Amino acid sequence: MPDSPHFTPAAFTFLRQLARHNERTWFKSHQASYERDVREPFLAVIAALQVPLASISPRFRADPRKVGGSLFRVQRDTRFAADKQPYKTWAGARLFHERHRERPAPSFYLHIQPGECFVGAGLWHPESATLKRIRAFIADNPAAWRRAAHGRDFAARYEFWGEKLTRAPQGYTPDHPLIEDLKLKSYAAGCALDDALVLSPRLVAEVGAHLHRLAPLVDYLCAALDLEF
């Protein structure tokens, strides 16, 4: 039986080299390495994640197409960025909701970068109107939020990422029992992955297990945004 899809050390080697030579001429001359060592293995991992994802929700997609699928482009959008480096020095994939192009929706996410690999889920930097909807839903449905985001299994493995407001958001008192959650600017959580796991045939199984454990958070956020899960 063939090994489950995973990365080889060559993926990390390429990404480290790209970080040192982040310029178009270097990338063009090494594009075959990117295709062979980073993009093709990642597309295979995405395709393999279709099975565990389908057992979680029929509404989410692990799309292994080279263009327009789950894998983010390696090219950076530098139009409005102070940093004009043309390429991302990491590789990432979003397992997205079927309606993500229509409206804000949570997703699952896998990030590959030497020493900084991680898996996560949720909404990163949602717009103000989306934040208000999530906060209102948490305030109205606190018990389900605690089960989704503060259960023992979840709390033992995952942490919420991103910045918080320094004060209570408008409409909420500082002594609200969930005030620290209501201060969040992003509703995304996850955990680091060891580089050794990313290079192991266990990668898809382990990431699939994380997706299952993160699913209650995604389910809750879908409910907050009137999305089917």
Image (cartoon, helix red, strand yellow):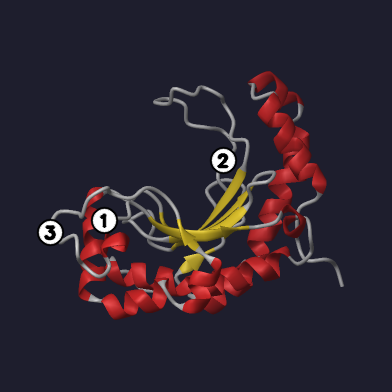
Badge 3 amino acid: Gly
Question: How far is the residue under mark 2 from the one under mark 3?
Answer: 39 Å
* Numbered tag placed on residue 73 in the rendering: 2
Q: Residue at x 59, y 37 (%)?
A: 74
Give the residue pinned by disc 3. Answer: 171
**172 lies left or right of 158:** left
- State the count of labels: 3
Q: Residue at x 70, y 37 (%)?
A: 15
Badge 1 amino acid: Thr
Q: Residue at x 69, y 19 (%)?
A: 25
Tell me if residue 68 comes above or below residue 175 in the rendering.
above
Count residues near mark 2 (Cα–Cα under 10 Å), then give few for <14, some for 14-19, many for 20+.
some
Q: Earlier in the sequence, mark 2 or mark 3?
A: 2
* Numbered tag placed on residue 55 in the rendering: none
Badge 2 amino acid: Arg
**47 lies left or right of 9:** left
User: Where's residue 212, x and y in %?
Assistant: 55, 74
Foreground pick, 159 / 219: 159
User: Where's residue 7, x and y in %?
Assistant: 76, 53
Give the residue pinned by disc 1. Answer: 130
Front of the two marks 2 and 3: 3
Count residues near mark 1 (Cα–Cα under 10 Å), then give few for <14, some for 14-19, many for 20+.
some
Quarter of the picture containing the C terminus is: bottom left
Question: How far is the residue under mark 1 from the one under mark 2?
Answer: 26 Å
Tell me if residue 145 comes above or below residue 118 in the rendering.
below
The residue lying furthest to the right in this view is 1
Q: Earlier in the sequence, mark 1 or mark 2?
A: 2
The residue lying furthest to the left in this view is 171
